[in-house]
Image (cartoon, helix red, strand yellow):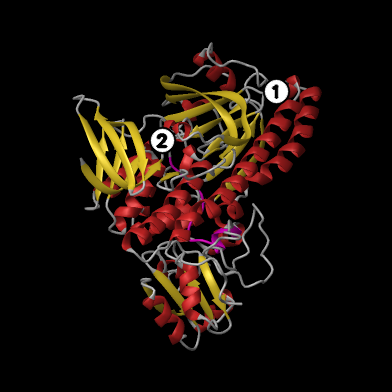
Amino acid sequence: MIDTEILVVGGGPVGLTLAGELGWRGTGCMLLEERTAPTAHPKATLLGARSMELFRRWGITDQIYARALPQDARYAITFSTRLAGHELYRLASPSIRETIERPPEIMARHRELQWSPYAKTQIGQQALEPVLWDFAAAQPAVALRHGWRLLSFVEAADGVIAQAEELASGRTQAIHARYLVACDGGGSPIRRSLGIRMNGRGRMRANVSFYFRSQEFLRVHDRGLGNLYFVMAPDSFGVFTAIDGVELWNFQHYFLDPARETQDVDAAAILHRAMGRPFAFELLGTTHWHHHQSVARRWRSAGGRIFLAGDAAHLFAPTGGVGMNTGIGDAVDLAWKLDGVVRGWGGTALLDSYEAERKPVAWRNSVISANNSDKIDAVMDETPGCIDHDGPEGDAARACIRSRLRWMARQFSSAGTHLGHRYVDSPVIASDGSPEPPDDPSMLVPSTWPGMRAPHAFLGPDTTSGGPSTLDWFGQGWVLCHGAGVPGALLEALRAAGLPVRAQPVPEGLRALFERPFVLVRPDGHVAWRGDAAPHDPAGLAELVRGQTGHNPTG
């Protein structure tokens, strides 16, 4: 039998992020994944600003950009009758280069760039996974076992005993881990073995995706290079997605009838009909799937040694691009807490707080995604069959649908969804009783309200995305941000409790942004406490934020 601190089952983006985060912190873990290569299908295609901020701490954003859409490609979302037919509506977001360089005219046009060094980054899962894989493999504390399958597990008082099989040889290995994390997908065998059911709307409707290669794709239509191309003709509802912006593309074909089966489909007929004319392509893969809005009832086993993360804990509709990003947030949240417990400064409530914090985020994000899907479906369902006809009838139909598209397309302004989640009623966050800032999917109100992400601001004249930011203060340990004076008693109490913490002076010009003279920020960049003065019970606050007590010592 071999021993590891944490056993991670599943090597998709969430499992690799969890392993990478643990390894980056120096905590040992082993990852089991049946595949021996990254996924071949770009199941997810968008990294939100918060995920990019988290990967910034690792120093891998340049590698992500290198595998994303070309840096000069504008992030255009178009709506057309058919892709080579009538264009109905268009939205534009900044390109990667514009996001990096942030010229004044772009900053004025796209307010989301005020709130983060990053915006949306279009990258297929098949291109992201190798970046995360390479980072995790480079961490000495991480053991990646690709080509291995979990056979069984038993939860014990001191951990989990698992049996794993190497698929190529058939040999088996017993593994003892203090904790096991299920990152094994929406059908999670681990979740099912634990008897944990899913709540929510469940399956919403069927879809089929065609992943294909085509050198002709951009030449057949006149929409230019964008990231999403919606097709509104009733016989071809769906969206083309740019995977590499050169020759790799994906088409999600939507069936509004929830009873419709997707097995008997003709890829060429569907793709040519959606395009509006024939074009040459090589089909690389076909995937049958469903929209979902599902969240696991529990995220932890009864014995407390097994956790769910990513798709094992929640399933989303893809409308909004928050499913994978929510899973990445799960992984980072759980990793620093497991690291704290393994190192001895984290208490039992720290692990309890994982579900208390992340499950409400999953509900919030999955409902936002489902609502987005409902709005798209409603507009598609209202689209008349004459939408692509020439002449007065078609002109009138297109004018009518354009107004509906403008209403529906507001969902693509989603900076608040990605950056504005907050942890309310967490057992390890000290509430100060102040009003909660607005939670608006389209915008962010930066705040140090306890539970929110600490705000971003550039620290010098370099305001390109790689310029020094307040975000760079946070990551490995705890940070006590302060104004004119250091609350020495609190700093001493935190250190006495074992927390790896340092003091960080806030430049005078940024003190209004931080709202209070003293702000304690956790290793994940979320605010644990803030105050106008040091707490009356510094030791009690230290015990609360590290998960050793359930009372609020700040009064």
The local crowd at label 2, few if under 14, some if 14 to 19, many if 20 or more residues have their Cα within 10 Å, is many
Inspect this view and state whether residue 477 appears: yes
Q: Residue furthest front?
A: 157
Q: Which mark is residue 445?
A: none
Disc 1 residue type (three-letter): Asp
* 287 relative to 435, above or below: above
Which residue position is annotated with label 2? Answer: 184
Inspect this view and state whether residue 11 appears: no
In the rendered image, residue 116 lying in the magenta stretch gets the answer: yes
Which residue position is annotated with label 1? Answer: 388
Disc 2 residue type (three-letter): Asp
Q: Quadrant of residue 221?
A: top right
* 247 relative to 547, above or below: above
The residue that appears at 52% across and 51% down in the rendered structure is 355
Per the model, the C-alpha gap separating discs 1 and 2 is: 43 Å
Residue 157 located left or right of residue 535 = left
Mark 1 residue element: helix
- The C terminus appears in which quarter of the rendering? bottom right
The residue that appears at 66% across and 21% down in the rendered structure is 258
Q: Nearer the viewer, residue 46 or 159?
A: 159
Q: Nearer the viewer, residue 552 or 43?
A: 552
Q: Nearer the viewer, residue 320 or 553?
A: 553
Magenta residues (range)? 111-123
Pinpoint residue 75: horizontal percent, then vertical percent. 53, 45
Mark 2 residue element: loop
